[in-house]
């Protein structure tokens, strides 16, 4: 795919206890057996299941992500988890700015920018989520919204390693709704974002950064989405909770032309 290694990431949201995580991981690794993956695989369990996920995937190439982090390394922030804590727990990645956090927990473009900075500072690969709501799409301001989110999220953070940075375009109207963006709709925004990234960070960065699509990705739509020129994988919610579906997405999305 386009010279960029695809990534399939599972966002488990507030699903799976530590015991359920252990069961998933052992089933999933069993299914992978000797398969040579053509993509990077990342799982984002809830904080309390990170340890189970890290120990269960030890010795494999599967990365583990936090679903959020605080922008300070420590402090009086009840209920929060920091970059050094995720790193020490064995995370390689962290999801930042998911629409559920933006809508339900007060994440803003400004705090997302601070969180991205915190992730990079702590050697965690950010999976930076952005996307428009249905209302914004219907109002014809999708491009404006994603440009604002992208520009503000990156802000003045200085970094240039595109391999250590992931963007996920997730139209809010497609998350958990069963309504997927068509490959054409998704590709249009991905190409737009890549061009914006070229203007913001130069073409070396924009050509190599991975931009994932998220929003009702399933085994039966993964192939048509992932084959689009500017789509480099998926951030998968619901369908990442079942090992066979998640593997189905990996196969359909990254092993078929
Ligand atoms: P979904 O969620 O695949 O269940 O639509 C995607 C996400 O929220 O990242």
Image (spheres, helix red, strand yellow):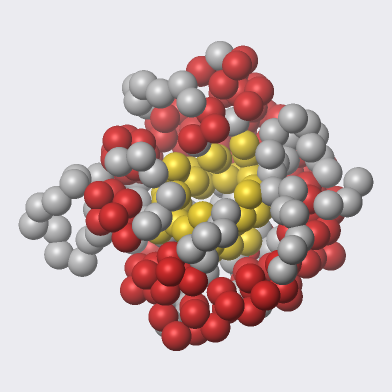
Which corner quadrant of the figure contains ligand 1? bottom right
Q: Decide which of 171, 64 is in the foreground and name it.
A: 64
Pinpoint residue 75: horizontal percent, then vertical percent: 10, 52
Q: Decide which of 214, 137 is in the foreground and name it.
A: 214
Q: Residue visible at 83% across and 58% down?
A: 252
Relative placement, left or right, of 147 versus 46 is right
Relative placement, left or right, of 129 versus 29 is left
Relative placement, left or right, of 251 versus 108 is right
Q: Decide which of 220, 250 is in the foreground and name it.
A: 250
Q: Is residue 115 above or below residue 68?
A: above
Pinpoint residue 248: horizontal percent, then vertical percent: 78, 67
Task: State the image quarter where residue 101 is shown.
Answer: bottom left
Q: Is residue 21 visible?
A: yes
Pinpoint residue 29: horizontal percent, then vertical percent: 63, 71
Relative placement, left or right, of 32 versus 68 is right
Q: Among all residues in the image, which is located at the extreme right?
A: 257
Q: Residue visible at 56% across and 74% down?
A: 25
């Amino acid at each position: 795919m386009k010279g960029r290694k695809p990534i399939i990431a599972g966002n488990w949201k507030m699903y799976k206890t530590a015991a359920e995580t252990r069961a998933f991981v052992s089933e999933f690794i069993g299914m992978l057996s000797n398969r040579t993956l053509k993509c990077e695989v990342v799982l984002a369990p809830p904080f309390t299941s990170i340890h189970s996920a890290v120990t269960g995937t030890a010795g494999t190439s599967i990365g583990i992500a936090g679903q959020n982090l605080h922008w300070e390394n420590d402090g009086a922030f009840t209920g929060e988890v920091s970059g050094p804590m995720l790193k020490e727990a064995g995370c390689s990645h962290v999801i930042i700015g998911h629409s559920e956090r933006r809508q339900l927990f007060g994440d803003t473009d400004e705090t997302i920018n601070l969180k991205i900075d915190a992730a990079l500072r702590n050697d965690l690969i950010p999976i930076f989520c952005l996307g428009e709501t249905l209302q914004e799409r219907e109002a014809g301001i999708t491009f404006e919204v994603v440009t604002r989110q992208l520009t503000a999220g990156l802000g003045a953070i200085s970094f240039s390693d595109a391999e250590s940075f992931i963007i996920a375009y997730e139209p809010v109207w497609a998350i958990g709704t069963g309504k997927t963006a068509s490959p054409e709709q998704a590709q249009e925004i991905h190409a737009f974002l890549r061009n914006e990234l070229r203007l913001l960070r130069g073409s070396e960065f924009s050509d190599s950064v991975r931009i994932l699509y998220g929003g009702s990705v399933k085994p039966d739509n993964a192939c048509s989405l992932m084959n689009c020129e500017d789509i480099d994988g998926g951030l998968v919610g619901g369908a990442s909770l079942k090992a066979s579906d998640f593997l189905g997405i990996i196969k359909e999305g990254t092993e078929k032309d």
